[in-house]
Image (tube, rainbow, N blue to C red):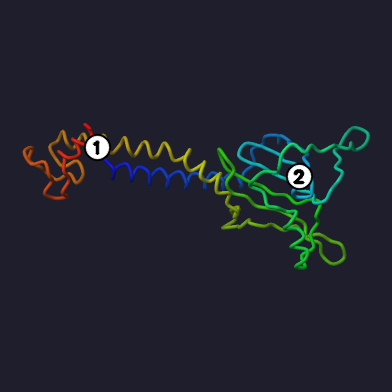
Amino acid sequence: MLRRAVRAGLVHIAAGLGAALLIAVALANTTTGATPRLLGPFYDPDRLGIWLEERTPGRRSVIFMLARSRIYEDAPGAPRLVSPRPERASPAWTTDWSRAIPAMQASGTMIDPTQTQEHAFGWPAVCLASADYLEEQAGGTFIARSEHAHRINGVVVPGRVWAPGLVINTLVLGAPAGAAYLVGTLIISMARRHRGVCPLCCYPTDPEITVCPECGHDAAHEQSRLAA
């Protein structure tokens, strides 16, 4: 029984992990067509900036603006000043751009510190993320760059893993596979006992012999553990 439970757990983890990664990559390469729900803007004193978050099913996008004290949104007639709210810290899966941007600039990579975007994908929780930013070239031109985003045969694969989200998705998405494996093995074991063969290796056994001569499975011991 313990061996069966361990195998069911491994199936649960393998199926859940595979499904979590496949769903996140699929979401990164498709559009939902849904209108993003804007959350924010928010002050983030610990990261010295303002950020906005947009949400659509399976996708989160954050725009981080380093050391930006004012933000405007489109409004009839003229842009309208929006007052950010210091209600919460920025999402846990995002990069600390208040440190990353100065570090990149110190190394010679000049980027626009007012608009850095980070995108995360996954269901039911986001688990893979990538980032986009603008690198300033000589002459004042900007080139779009990506970070933690890989292309494999034209498929975009976000390369930054958010472990808590991946664990949640693995547990949720792998549950049906683990349960199906456990139920299936129990049904097969019962069917083999009914046929008079070993429930593990299917070797023909004598009803008076409780230990299988082929694999050593002790049916009497298993039944006593189940009864206990």
Residue 141 appears at what percent x and percent y? Answer: 84, 61
Residue 166 appears at what percent x and percent y? Answer: 53, 46
Q: Residue at the right extreme?
A: 77
Q: Residue at x 67, y 49 (%)?
A: 94
Residue nearer the viewer, 26 or 147: 147
Q: Residues within 10 Å of mark 2 (few under 14, many from 20)?
A: many
* Mark number displayed over residue 202: none
Give the image quarter of residue 99. bottom right
Spatial CA distance of label 2 from label 1 is 57 Å
Give the image quarter of residue 148. bottom right
Mark 2 vs mark 1: in front = 2
Residue corresponding to mark 2: 44
Q: Earlier in the sequence, mark 2 or mark 1?
A: 2
Q: Residue at x 67, y 47 (%)?
A: 119
Amino acid type at circle 1 is: Ile
Residue nearer the viewer, 97 or 131: 97
Q: Residue at x 16, y 36 (%)?
A: 193
Residue nearer the viewer, 47 or 158: 47
- Secondary element type, mark 1: helix
- Secondary element type, mark 2: strand
Task: State if disc 1 and disc 2 touch (CB < 8 Å).
Answer: no
- Quarter placement of the C terminus: top left
Q: Residue at x 67, y 43 (%)?
A: 91
Lateral position of residue 184 relative to residue 64, left or right: left
Residue corresponding to mark 1: 188
